[in-house]
Amino acid sequence: MNPELTQWTGPLGLPRFDLIRDEDFAPGFDACLKLAADAVEAIAANPEPPDFDNTVAALETAEEPLNRLCAIFFTLAGVDSNPARQDLQRRIAPRLAAHGSRVSMDPRLFDRVEAVRQDMDDLSPEDRRLTELTLRGLRRAGAGLTGAARDRMAAIRERLAVLSTDFTQNLLTDERDFTMAVADDALAGLPDWLIRAMRAAARERGLPGQIVTLNRSLIVPFLEYAEDRALREAAWRAWAARGDGSGAGGAATDNRPIAAEILQLRHERARLLGYPDFASYKLEPEMAGNAENVEALLMQVWAPARARAEQDAARFTEMLRGDGVNGALAPWDWRFYAERRRKAEHDLDETEIKPYLTLDAMIGAVFDTANRLFGLEMRALDAELWAPDVRAWRVTRGDRLLAVFLGDFHARPGKRSGAWCSTLQSQHRIGAGQHPIVVNVCNFTPPEDKGAPVYLSWDDAHTLFHEFGHALHNILSDVTWPSISGTSVARDFVELPSQLFEHWLEQPEVLDRHARHAETGAPLPAALRDRIIAAGNADQGFATVEYLESALVDLAFHRGEPPADPMARQAEVLAGLGAPAAIPMRHATPHFAHVFSGDGYSSGYYSYMWSEVMDADAFEAFMEKGDAFDPETAEKLERWILSKGDSLPADELWLKFRERRPGVDALLRGRGLVAGP
């Protein structure tokens, strides 16, 4: 086995990606799966009476080589996929699932952990919490099952691993392979920066002229500015067709039957464990607790959001008529007329804004905000990573190294769409301890010319702040055990730090300091800054409705009997909501990666809004002090939220920080869906 797969020799413990070849991974998985199986077997078969150290604590490090290998491989599979990596991902998924089943369903481990739980008087609070969570995880994985039920559970888990991999790769294929050429005489309305980005995308693929791809940072502005309605329709339909069998990959990448089988298997899995449906199983350990609480929150927001969207639809229909179109307002029209209204009502032009929102300037804003709130210092680090444009920083506070932070910001062929935060290694205090290595991934459109500024939209800048909020949750983690560090928290709590950090982008003092013109260096004019902030809620009816549609469809998929035809259930839910025809789901079923590329957000897409209730209330804690950088509130936020991981239940951490429960009013005010201060 290539030792660099598990014994990283780069600066500050980073992997040396330049020393790793694709052909190293298969033998690496063979070796690491054997090491992990042997280590876990030694714990399960230990003749000594079970105690915390020889059972619960031992499990925390038993699979460390495998975890490190998986961190490298699945990072590469997401940011720089190729046929060899895709093939191995398909082959390794069921083997990893089978290993996970053998471990988590081993009755010997369950009995040993249960014995530890029976006698926890001498354990620290964090050790007791870890013991309880370990036992809960084993029980929910099926460790209590026997005979045919046990075998069936293992088979379900292996099949789900295959299906989620297939779903992900089908989506990646459709996104990677689609391009739409745009002729020189069809560029009307497109700003120069977008045309340059389209030409750069064409050149990267060896194509002439300019193209539209399914990179969100390219297709969304195309839908906002292209005056050619037929081209907007073609682009939107390609975006909407991802994974439905009519996209670039054709029938081979049809995710609809995959989604149906996933839902059936999840339901069967929940019933084997004694739950009435998958939503009941999935939501049991979350803050929400059950589907009824989730639905109650979402429907509180649905009515005002739909009302706002219907008002906007009427206005945009008038604008459509003014352009001589007699048909109904369509999904490919909404963003175009929303942008036109924003320009008219707020005197805003993205072309005017973008020079002030360069990637480097906004990275500076992110880092400065983290410094002012938490005293973090970021220094560039020279390291061999998976692509030349991936950047690294050491994160310190005083003389102490806290973390290494990696930023992969640019779209490229073979990179999964969207934005996310992950870790190559988690923080812990076992032995000498371990600092986290945190990765933020975005898909910003690279510049046409190498070395030229990368211009961000306002939404892109929010994404940058959002993902660094997740990074802070990992960077500031300060717990003993890796499985409860950083973002390893309840799903409907994990978005609190990320969504909260977005608020600082909109602070005038942050923009005044960092939003500088790429060519002149002049600061963002105060009047323009104020117009940007004032326009922040201009299209919140659309944004809230498209999100809620996805969250409510996700919930419906996992409540009660699973649908034989998910597309029919999707249509049924949207019809029941009275969803506006011109606002489709943000993530339609065939490309709903949050829900079907693994089960992290399955029955849990609502969590963004659940967390938003808290993030709106949390930022009010700073506003109540009259200072967005109030040091006392920042220290309390770090002490009770950002540093604690899952060492206490999420609702307890929230109450220790805020000392009261949050309400939905701050969220509605923040989205501009109700009047109020």
Image (cartoon, helix red, strand yellow):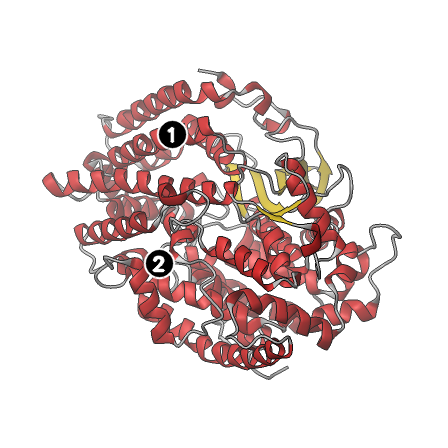
Residue 105 location (% of width, % of height): 23, 38
Q: Residues within 10 Å of mark 2 (few under 14, many from 20)?
A: many
Element class at badge 1: loop
Residue type at numbered disc 2 = Ser
Q: Which residue is mark 2?
A: 603
Residue for point 82% across, 50% down = 518
Image quadrant where one finds the C terminus: bottom right
Above or below: residue 148 compared with residue 465: above
Q: Quick one: 21 or 400, which is closer to the camera?
A: 21
Residue 569: numbered disc:
none
Question: Label 1 near label 2: C-beta < 8 Å?
Answer: no
Which of the two discs, 2 and 1, labels the residue nearer the N terminus? 1
Q: Which residue is mark 1?
A: 63
Residue 564 location (% of width, % of height): 23, 57
Residue 573 figure quarter: bottom left
Residue for point 57% across, 25% down = 17
Find the distance from the CA under tag 2 to the CA under tag 1. 28 Å
- Furthest-bottom residue in this view: 675
